[in-house]
Image: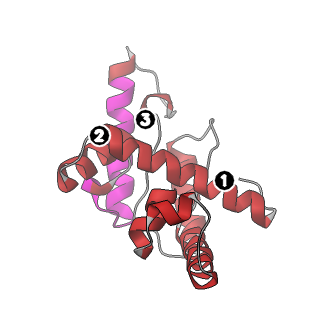
């Protein structure tokens, strides 16, 4: 996250790593944390199925706009029905998620499948998928730390 702060706020990474920040820069980092917390909403329910995800989006939209939805581990998302193998089930989940994307006007090329989102972001920014995955995981860790600091569980 230090790199994200440095890049976003034009602060030298070395200053952040050595904790040699001015009070102004410390406040700027705190403000960035608050803004990120307002925009990032995470559900980590491992039993969430496609219908649960739809309800989650409906409820989230009552308090804030939802522009992008990222599903981690598409292969374990549940969907009603019986399928001959995992590939067919994953295809059915993908189709259901694309319908949700259209229903809620979430751009399909920006998310609903973590791997697709990572690959899209990597191509769009001319970086490796591993780099994008690391940034994504750092953002999740960041949200958890913020939630802990605010005393709210995720």
Q: Is residue 124 magenta?
A: no
Residue 135 x/y as whole percent: 42, 50
Please say which color scheme the image uses: secondary structure
Badge 2: few (under 14), some or many (20 or more) residues near its Cα, within 10 Å?
some
Q: Which mark is residue 144?
A: 1
* Residue at 50 percent of width and 45 percent of height: 137
Find numbered disc 3 in the image and state the secondary structure of the residue it sits on. helix
Find numbered disc 2 in the image and state the secondary structure of the residue it sits on. helix
Compared with residue 124, is residue 50 higher up or lower down, i.e. above or below? above
Relative to 116, is 97 on the left or the right? right
- Looking at marks 1 and 2 on the same chain, the residue that comes earlier in the sequence is marked by 2
* Residue at 54 percent of width and 76 percent of height: 64
Q: Of discs 2 and 3, which sits in the foreground?
A: 2
* Residue at 50 percent of width and 29 percent of height: 76
| CA separation in Å, label 1 and label 2 | 23 Å
Residue 43 x/y as whole percent: 61, 51
Mark 1 and mark 2 residues within 8 Å of each other at the beta carbon: no
Q: Which residues are magenta?
A: 88-109
Badge 3: few (under 14), some or many (20 or more) residues near its Cα, within 10 Å?
some
Tag 2 residue = 129
Q: Which mark is residue 74?
A: 3
Find numbered disc 1 in the image and state the secondary structure of the residue it sits on. helix
Compared with residue 122, is residue 40 higher up or lower down, i.e. above or below? below
Badge 1: few (under 14), some or many (20 or more) residues near its Cα, within 10 Å?
some
Q: Nearer the viewer, residue 150 or 19?
A: 19
Residue 72 x/y as whole percent: 47, 40
């Amino acid at each position: 996250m230090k790199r994200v702060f440095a890049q976003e706020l034009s602060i030298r990474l070395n200053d952040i790593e050595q904790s040699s920040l001015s009070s102004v820069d410390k406040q700027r980092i705190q403000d960035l944390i608050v803004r990120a917390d307002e925009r990032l909403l995470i559900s980590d329910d491992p039993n969430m199925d496609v219908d649960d995800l739809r309800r989650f989006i409906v409820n989230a939209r009552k308090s804030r706009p939802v522009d992008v939805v990222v599903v981690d581990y598409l292969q374990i998302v549940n969907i009603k029905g019986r399928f001959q193998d995992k590939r067919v089930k994953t295809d059915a989940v993908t189709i259901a998620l694309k319908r949700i994307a259209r229903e809620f006007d979430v751009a399909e090329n920006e998310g609903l499948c973590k791997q697709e989102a990572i690959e899209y972001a990597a191509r769009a920014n001319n970086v490796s998928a591993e780099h994008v995955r690391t940034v994504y995981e750092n953002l999740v860790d960041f949200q958890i730390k913020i939630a802990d600091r605010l005393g709210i569980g995720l």
